[in-house]
Image (cartoon, rainbow, N blue to C red):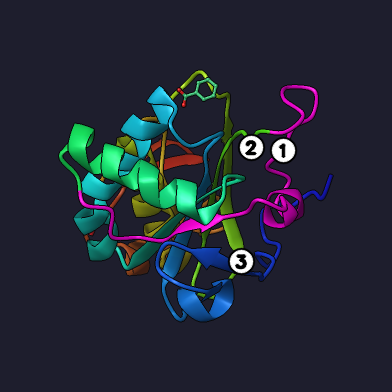
Amino acid sequence: MNIIRLGDIAPNFTAKSTEGRLDFHEWLGDSWGMLVSHPADFTPVCTTELGTMANYKEEFDERNVKVAAISVDPLDSHFEWIKDIEETQSAQLEFPLIADNKREISELYGMIHPNDNATMTVRSVFIIAPDKKVKLILTYPASTGRNFEELLRVIDSLQLTQYESLATPANWKKGEDCVILPSVSNEEAEKLFPKGFKEVKPYLRLTPQV
Ligand code: BEZ
């Protein structure tokens, strides 16, 4: 199984999708990206997930994140299934659903975990920065649908911490206090964070999000 780690360049691929042939890196362009795998078409949890992802599309667009989904089912099956998703989830799918019936991309991304299931992809999430580096990897079992609020929360954290000397604490949400990186001295922090900061411990300093 191919192993992708944080900081690796997301492997490029070309594939058939419901929005035409797709060169992954070209399609991402300068945007952030989120690639999610789902176990199989015409399954209940996946149906709710893809409907939810479609209904969150505006939130992803606002954050400049292009989203795509993938499974090992073929394209004609995807097109049939989309009709059900749109009917049952009051959603319009406006992102590519990739057909990986040869399992090449699923293998490339380590989305098949043979000790869990020999043929189906698990529920993987890869979040990719504009430089094509992998910033987040999550793996859920088939039995647990993903929480898209959490995915947006992580994207907010990634986009904030990419450009500031900050990290985000447990359960952080956009707008809440952030943690100043330990590598930043108090003198530097005074210049960097005009709203000031609270020193709970020398290594735990909080500053409002700007
Ligand atoms: C589902 O999406 O509902 C599902 C898929 C594979 C196994 C179990 C559940």
- Pick the front one: 149 or 16: 16
Where disc 1 sits, the SS reads: loop
Q: Alpha-carbon neighbours of circle 2 within 10 Å: few (<14), some, or many (≥20)? A: many
Residue under pointer 2 = 121
Pointer 1: what residue?
A: 112
Could you tell me the amino acid type at mark 2?
A: Thr
Quarter holding the N terminus?
A: top right
Q: Magenta segment range? A: 92-119
Q: Earlier in the sequence, mark 3 or mark 2?
A: 2
Q: Secondary structure at mark 2?
A: loop
Position of residue 199 relative to residue 28, above or below, is above
Q: Residue furthest top?
A: 143
Give the crowd class for mark 3: few <14, some 14-19, many >=20 residues within 10 Å: some
**Which amino acid is tagged 3?**
Lys
In the image, the residue with mark 3 has its CB under 8 Å from the nearest atom of ligand 1: no
Sequence-first tag of 2 and 1? 1
Please give the residue where the numbered disc 3 appears in the rendered image.
133
Q: Answer yes or no: disc 2 within 8 Å of ligand 1.
A: no
Residue 117 drawn in magenta: yes
Number of residues whose C-alpha sits closer than 10 Å to that of mark 1, classed few (under 14), some (14–19) or many (20 or more): many
Q: Are marks 2 and 1 in contact (CB under 8 Å)?
A: yes
Can residue 182 be seen here? The reply is yes
Q: Residue at x 56, y 55 (%)?
A: 99
The CA span between labels 3 and 1 is 21 Å
* Residue at position x 72%, y 33% in the image: 119
Return the x and y of residue 153 as percentages of the image width and height: 34, 43
Can you say which quadrant of the picture contains the C terminus? Answer: bottom left
Q: Report how far apart the C-alphas of labels 2 and 1 lie in the structure.
A: 5 Å
The answer for how far apart the CA atoms under marks 3 and 2 are is 22 Å
Q: Is residue 38 magenta?
A: no
